[in-house]
Image (spheres, rainbow, N blue to C red):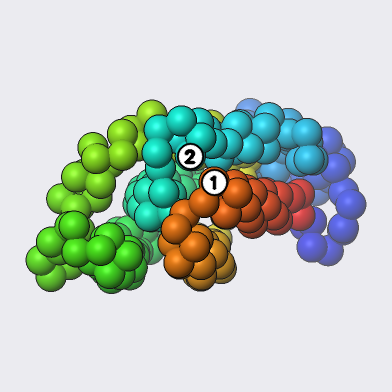
Amino acid sequence: MTSRHPGITPREIGEKMRADAGPGANEDVERLIQAVVARVSGPPPVAQSSSAPSVWVLVAANLLPIPGVLFWGWDAFALIALFWMENVVVGVFFILRILCADPLDPALWAGKLFMVPFFGLHYGIFTAVHGVFVFDMLGAKRYDVQGLHVLDAAARAAADYDLWLALAALVASHLFSFGWNYLYGGEFRRAALSALMTQPYRRVVVLHVAIILGGVGAMALGSPVWALVVLLAMKVGLDLKAHVKEHSAK
């Protein structure tokens, strides 16, 4: 109905359905009409702007590594390792997005039963290969990565540089965005499974090509503070641009 009558409101949809049903419609028809109107209405939209709460949370979480650079001796490798760990977090939340996409549509669950394990395997291998490059090559052989088993190396790097607080802040940022934008903002009602399968790859590829290139340059310079601050600023800018584009109202 909305495709044939663009701009029609949920209330007008209900009135038209009642008119089509006629004066003899019973209570079951009325309940059906109310269910359709409720489904079309959805939750109140969340304003998407540069001042949206999730944007401020994202910026705050991404600025937390600055004390690590200034006071805790973090180098370019520590930042790259931290942002690789964030990729794992991104994958987990995209699995949650797939599972929560329009949960009242039974037809989607058949697709989810296939897509969740497929995405987990595919994204997991993609992230693991990326992790081998980060920990085995950029880690100056300090972390002995066996095959694609990179989580042990990541845990050791997190302990060596004390990355846990910064990683927890990034997890909190993604959790807040998931709750605020995806659940409360109603994105789960209009999310397409095919789009959810590809979104994290676009973020990871664009962001980490830039970060790794910048990080390698900073490492070649001996990881001076100014280069690390520039690297953090670049990460915040790219992350912010991707976040606003992803959650902008359609």
Position of residue 191 in the picture relative to residue 34 (left or right): left
Which amino acid type is shown beneath numbered disc 2? Answer: Val
Position of residue 203 in the picture relative to residue 139 (left or right): right
Q: Quadrant of residue 121?
A: bottom left
Please rate how many residues cluster around mark 1, counting C-alpha atoms within 10 Å: few if below 14, some from 14 to 19, many from 20.
some
Q: Which residue is mark 1?
A: 225
Q: Quadrant of residue 158?
A: top left
- Check disc 2 and report its element: helix, strand or loop: helix
- Residue under the image location 45 percent in, 35 percent down: 68
Q: Which residue is mark 2?
A: 69
Which amino acid type is shown beneath numbered disc 1? Answer: Val
CB within 8 Å, label 1 to label 2 = yes
Q: Quadrant of residue 48?
A: top right
Residue 170 seen from this side? yes
- Residue under the image location 25 percent in, 63 percent down: 140
- Residue under the image location 78 percent in, 40 percent down: 50
Residue 72 image point, x, y percent: 40, 33
